[in-house]
Image (cartoon, rainbow, N blue to C red):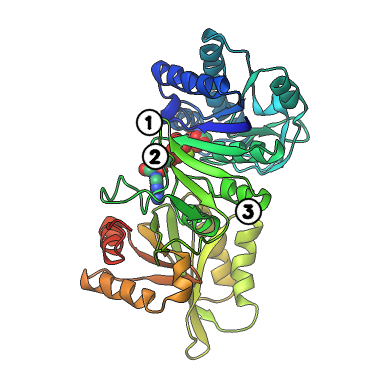
Amino acid sequence: MGLIVQKYGGTSVGSPERIKNVARRVARWRQEGHQIVVVVSAMSGETNRLIALAKEIQAQPDPRELDVMVSTGEQVTIALVAMALIDLGLKCRSYTGGQVRILTDSAFTKARISNIDDLNLRRDLRDGYVVVVAGFQGVDEAGNITTLGRGGSDTTGVALAATLAADECQIYTDVDGVYTTDPRIVPEARRLKTVTFEEMLEMASLGSKVLQIRSVEFAGKYKVKLRVLSSFEEAGEGTLITFEEDEKMEQATISGIAFNRDEAKITILGVPDRPGIAYQILGPVGDANIDVDMIVQNVGHDGLTDFSFTVHRNDYSRVLEILTPIALHIKAREVQGGNRIAKVSVVGVGMRSHAGIASTAFRTLAEEGINIQMISTSEIKISIVIDEKYMELAVRVLHKVFGLDQPS
Ligand code: ADP
Ligand code: ASP
Ligand code: MG
């Protein structure tokens, strides 16, 4: 008997039939004597529909009002799931983020959780209720509704599991675990039985949407036992995120290939090569609350250098707006941009002890005639930026060359 947090994603609650299916699963866990907290997303497609609707009124929707609106998607689902559970004869209560008091900062559309008031939830669990909580949303100090960024229900799930010291946080989705790469792009991808927390962190941050990165960060910080499972299968152990590299297991050198086509590249050509220049360029970008990902500065020639970096595609036009006057001010030659790029990354803790991974990756891409525009590496990952049109090809050939399609 334990306390389990189960999070169900959009597809898993995408129709009345699927919601009833979720309720039946929850009922089985209850019958086994577990206390259950259910976290749900909006029904599939609903968040996109709401965002598109907002954009019909205001091209760049006001962030506060956008959060008021998109948070309704999850509010609908909690009520439907609660009804389905009550219909099965279970005691159940639904809560919005604000009703729980999932406290966040005020960064609308990308808020961070700062505190969770677990009083009501604990009381309900003690009294035998299943508690159903809306994912993706919270409330700031002033009482404004906030949302946690796309995919944020994962983070609600893990944060609740951490607060309640749950025995396990189960992320139910439309695949039966974490794969060596997105199985929708590479059908030969294989499910990983375990993946280390560090690898999962890299994969999530490099574009594997199966878990929102902040949920993995939370799991790491509070040592939450986290598992990804299919909501469509009756049984199955899914993928467990582990904290220790299991020495007994034959660790593959590479665990997965992640990719991301949500980025854009900005290059400033002919920048005077002097101290403080990176700060002059990136300071104002950071001040605008825009995250910068890869940064490359070339070796200078004749006192000039080129400076490139990537940002989320949504921030692309804003960054060009910010940098055009700055480029003029620092007397750079030109600002160039491109948003038809993709980032492909090879991830694995085994890289630490194996040389030659990078050269194998570069050779493989060269053989396919794929030009590399930027490279960045860490101990356990190699990321490259390429033309977006080669992304799927790059993912497939890298997946194959590192033997990820072979049973381990
Ligand atoms: P949910 O709505 O349940 O939160 P998401 O669409 O956010 O589901 O995440 C699940 C999807 O993540 C899968 O359908 C799959 O296409 C995608 N995905 C990307 N990379 C991976 C990976 N390495 N392993 C499994 N799924 C992945
Ligand atoms: N409904 C939100 C989204 O589509 C949150 C989530 O599904 O995790 O991004
Ligand atoms: Mg998701």
The kind of residue tagged 3 is Asn
- Considering only order in the chain, which callout, 1 or 3, is on the residue closer to the N terminus? 1
Q: Secondary structure at mark 3?
A: loop
Q: Check the image and report above or below for 57 versus 282.
A: above
Nearer to us in this view, 263 or 226: 226
Q: Position of residue 139 (x, y in %)?
A: 70, 32
Q: Position of residue 197 (x, y in %)?
A: 54, 55
Residue ID at (60%, 32%): 4
Q: Is residue 327 visible?
A: yes
Label 3–label 2 contact, CB within 8 A: no
Label 2–label 1 contact, CB within 8 A: yes
Nearer to us in this view, 121 or 3: 3
Q: Residues within 10 Å of mark 3 (few under 14, many from 20)?
A: few
Residue extending furthest toward the left:
368
- Considering only order in the chain, which callout, 2 or 3, is on the residue closer to the N terminus? 2
Q: Position of residue 262 (x, y in %)?
A: 43, 52
Which residue is tagged 2?
176
Closer to the eye: label 3 or 1: 1
Q: CA distance from mark 3 to mark 2?
A: 35 Å
Residue ID at (55%, 44%): 226
Q: CA distance from mark 2 to mark 1?
A: 8 Å
Q: Secondary structure at mark 1?
A: loop
Which residue is tagged 1?
233
Q: Position of residue 321 (x, y in %)?
A: 53, 57
Q: Where is residue 394, by image quadrant?
A: bottom left
